[in-house]
């Protein structure tokens, strides 16, 4: 099941100790005749034709089209003729024969409600960007105290992210939304009434916990209630909501720009308690539970009801439920692990998942987005823009640019794929940061250069790294580790954001502003090189196929053997073709079929003596 453009390496198996070489004549299609094989139709080497009776599964798919190619018919690996290569589609049996599905109204409604939770983080970023300088003057904070206040949100969000999996796995995704909203409201109220630095930081701790809960559950929930064909677009709604929150935070600064600074920042903070109230209502009365979580808890009837809302009328949702069940069992067979062992001691496929998912989450903050957004006012001030009204107006314009580009990116992810957009985003960020650095070197147009460079940076970030950094982790992690792995990814994302935000002013002052932005440009190029090597394309693939897809990429035999075990157990025809002993729940090494021994000839003792 390899295509000409496939970069995967064939693996060794129990029947083929040495990985066989690829033969693209076989992989690209069925040979036109049996001339090369002497008419036998059977060659032992990989890359040759297989016997007619061993290609029954492939023939089913060959009847779906007129062009006989391995890529389109998903030819099986000769050693595992019943296992198909992973591919785009709603499930593993969808080879493009299912017409393009439309997003149902229910799916849009559920994704919208979940995305609202991300507005909390966005509003906090936006409101602190405008209120940071007011807060420093009102409470007489030092530069270090302000840095700690800004960066501490991410520090506390780490704790919320790591603990979110416990609630998400045990109580469900909806309870995670409710708890995140309640904790965020509590922290916002304390922050708004803070009389000193200690009470301000106390409220900040609860705001950070709420943000951490939300960041871990938002993309997971949206990814699990989305159709595979539209998952890229819907998961980016979370990032769109974050940017809507940022714009609202910027607008609050513009709205209260003429209010006394001692009161303005308190009013700006207090408005942040409004959106979480809507989240509590929607998660209680509108949003259903994730169908994949319901199947994991043996509540299949409820899962089918939710899937019937997500997919169009008449769609067979039973095959989706079966896929989810098989995936969970397959991953359990592959790992034999409980709790965090799957993540702490992963097999090659899971290791690659973690590298891609967690690495992408870290990369989002390594390019400096949170730090730059928190201190936009300081950057504008250093470039020569001192007017408070002008600063707030520029912030609103920058926020609207970022929001508009993200809306466009949501449609492009499902059309162009993940890799191209991430590469364009990182290359554009590198060039934009170089332009920003020029505004601090000197020249008459330094203010215009700074604004232009920042606008480009936010636009290029939003076309790929912004939504993609949450889309990719939400889909590459398999069902068994998704909640825990998303907690780790969010934790590391917040760790990186904490380091960047807490040291931004100090490093920029020590290195000079131009030197700092040049350094960040180089970081973007390094991340680009890393993603070019390790980031696979996951556009259009069902979530249930991710573990097998990464097993194909890494050559992880444990996943492939678990898939084969499930096939032998569930497919009675496979028993008729190749009788094998029943597989026990705790799988041992698969036993090889041994051909029945032929009775020895009558003169065997004579032949033995002569030998």
Image: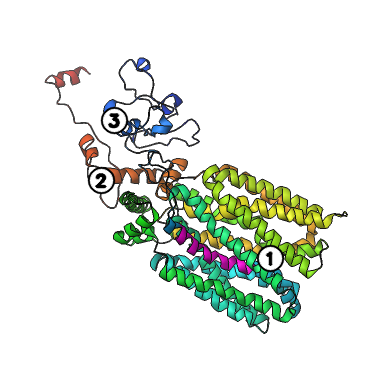
Side (left or right) of 3 relative to 127: left
Specify the segment rendered in magenta: 108-125
Q: How many tags in the picture?
A: 3
Cα–Cα span, label 1 and label 3 = 62 Å
The location of residue 482, given as percent across then percent down, is 44, 57
Query: Which residue is located at x 69 percent, y 72 percent?
Result: 255
User: Would you call the spot at circle 3 few (<14 residues within 10 Å), some (14-19), or many (20 or more)?
Assistant: some
Task: Identify whether 594 is placed above or below 526.
Answer: above
Q: Looking at this rendering, what residue extends furthest in the right direction? A: 444
Task: Identify whether 118 is placed above or below 39.
Answer: below
Label 2: element kind: helix
Say which residue label 3 marks: 54
Say which residue label 1 marks: 374
Side (left or right) of 447 relative to 82: right
Q: Is residue 253 visible?
A: yes
User: Would you call the spot at circle 2 few (<14 residues within 10 Å), some (14-19), or many (20 or more)?
Assistant: few
Query: Which residue is located at x 39 percent, y 64 percent?
Result: 288
Q: Are marks 1 and 3 in contact (CB under 8 Å)?
A: no
Cα–Cα span, label 3 and label 2 = 18 Å
Query: Which residue is located at x 63 percent, y 64 percent?
Result: 246
Say which residue label 2 marks: 570
The location of residue 330, given as percent across then percent down, is 34, 50
Query: Which residue is located at x 83 percent, y 56 percent?
Result: 446
Residue toward you, 272 or 429: 272
Cα–Cα span, label 2 and label 1 = 55 Å
């Amino acid at each position: 099941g390899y295509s000409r453009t496939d970069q995967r390496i064939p693996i060794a198996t129990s029947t083929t100790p040495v990985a066989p070489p690829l033969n693209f004549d076989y992989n690209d299609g069925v040979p036109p005749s049996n001339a090369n094989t002497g008419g036998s139709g059977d060659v032992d080497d990989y890359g040759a034709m297989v016997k007619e009776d061993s290609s029954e599964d492939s023939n089913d798919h060959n009847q779906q089209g007129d062009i006989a190619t391995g890529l389109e018919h998903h030819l099986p690996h000769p050693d595992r003729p019943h296992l198909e290569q992973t591919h785009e589609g709603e499930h593993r049996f969808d080879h493009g024969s299912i017409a393009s599905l439309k997003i149902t109204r229910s799916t849009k409604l559920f994704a919208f409600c979940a995305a609202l939770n991300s507005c909390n983080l966005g509003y906090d970023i936006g409101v602190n960007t405008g209120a940071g300088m007011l807060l420093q003057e009102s409470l007489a904070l030092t530069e270090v105290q302000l840095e700690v206040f800004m960066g501490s949100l991410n520090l506390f969000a780490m704790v919320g992210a790591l603990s979110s999996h416990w609630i998400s796995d045990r109580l469900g995704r909806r309870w995670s939304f409710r708890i995140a909203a309640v904790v965020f409201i509590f922290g916002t109220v304390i922050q708004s009434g803070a009389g000193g630095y200690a009470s301000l930081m106390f409220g900040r701790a609860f705001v950070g916990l709420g943000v951490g809960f939300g960041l871990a559950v938002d993309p997971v929930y949206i990814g699990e209630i989305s159709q595979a064909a539209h998952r890229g677009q819907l998961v980016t709604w979370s990032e769109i909501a974050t940017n809507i929150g940022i714009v609202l935070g910027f607008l609050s600064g513009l709205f209260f720009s003429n209010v006394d600074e001692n009161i303005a920042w308190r009013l700006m903070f207090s408005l942040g308690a409004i959106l979480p109230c809507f989240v509590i209502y929607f998660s209680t009365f509108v949003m259903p539970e994730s169908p994949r979580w319901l199947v994991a808890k043996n509540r299949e009837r409820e899962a089918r009801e939710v899937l019937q809302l997500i997919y169009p009328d008449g769609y067979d949702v039973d095959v989706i439920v079966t896929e989810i069940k098989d995936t969970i069992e397959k991953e359990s067979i592959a790992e034999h692990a409980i709790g965090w062992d799957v993540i702490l001691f992963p097999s090659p496929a899971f290791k690659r998942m973690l590298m891609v998912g967690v690495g992408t989450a870290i990369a989002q903050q390594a390019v400096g987005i949170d730090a730059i957004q928190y201190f936009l006012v300081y950057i504008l001030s250093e470039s020569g823009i001192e007017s408070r009204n002008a600063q707030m107006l520029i912030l609103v314009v920058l926020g609207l640019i970022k929001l508009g580009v993200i809306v466009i990116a949501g449609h492009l992810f499902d059309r162009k794929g993940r890799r191209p957009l991430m590469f364009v985003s990182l290359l554009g960020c590198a060039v934009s940061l170089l332009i920003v650095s020029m505004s601090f070197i000197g020249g008459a147009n330094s203010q215009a250069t700074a604004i232009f460079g920042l606008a480009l940076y936010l636009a290029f970030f939003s076309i790929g790294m912004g939504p993609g950094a949450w889309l990719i982790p939400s889909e590459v992690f398999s069902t068994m580790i998704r909640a825990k792995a998303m907690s780790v990814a969010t934790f590391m994302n917040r760790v990186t954001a904490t380091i960047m935000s807490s040291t931004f002013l100090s490093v920029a002052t020590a290195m000079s502003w131009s030197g700092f932005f040049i350094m960040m440009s180089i970081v973007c190029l390094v991340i680009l090189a890393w993603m070019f090597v390790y980031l696979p394309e996951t556009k259009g693939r069902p979530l249930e196929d991710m573990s097998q897809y990464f097993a194909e990429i890494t050559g992880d035999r444990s996943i492939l053997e678990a898939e084969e075990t499930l096939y032998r157990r569930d497919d009675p025809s496979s028993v008729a073709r190749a009788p094998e002993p029943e597989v026990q729940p705790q799988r041992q090494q698969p036993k090889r079929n041994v051909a029945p021994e032929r009775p020895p000839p009558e003169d065997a003792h004579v032949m033995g003596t002569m030998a």
